[in-house]
Amino acid sequence: MSERWKYQVKTGGIWGVFMTVFNVLFDIKEIPFSEQVATPNFYIRAAAYILVGIFVLGYFTWKSKVKQQNP
C-alpha cells in the first residue's frame, strides 16, 4: 500500500469514527445507545462517514501535506 493510501486511511478513518461517535453522543438524550446501534441506519451512516473521510478528507489533506513539503 502506498504512503498516500496509508495516510488517507489513517486520517479519514479516524475522522469517520470520530463523527460516528459524536453523532451517537449528540442523540443519546433522545435515543438510547442500544437503540441507535440496533438500527441499520447507524451502520450506513458510519460507513458513509468513514468512506467520505478516507476518500474526500484524506485526499485533500494529503494534497495539502504534499504541497507543504514541496513549496
Image (cartoon, rainbow, N blue to C red):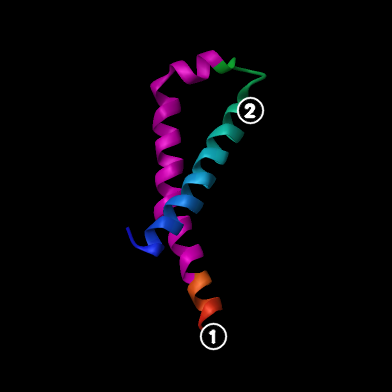
At a point 45% along the width and 16% down the height, the residue shown is: 38
Q: Which residue is mark 1?
A: 71
Q: Residue at x 40, y 63 (%)?
A: 3
Residue receiving disc 2: 25
Q: How many marks?
A: 2
Quadrant of the snapshot with the C terminus: bottom right
Q: Which of 57/41 is in front? A: 57
The stretch in magenta equals 34-63
Residue 23 in the figure: left or right of residue 6:
right
Query: Relative to 4, is 10 above or below?
Result: above
The structure residue drawn at horizontal position 53% and vertical position 78%, both measured from the top left corner, is 69
State if disc 2 and disc 1 touch (CB < 8 Å).
Answer: no
The residue furthest right is 29
Q: Position of residue 67 (x, y in %)?
A: 51, 77
The rendered magenta stretch, by its main secondary structure, is classed as helix
Which of the 4 image quadrants contains residue 1? bottom left
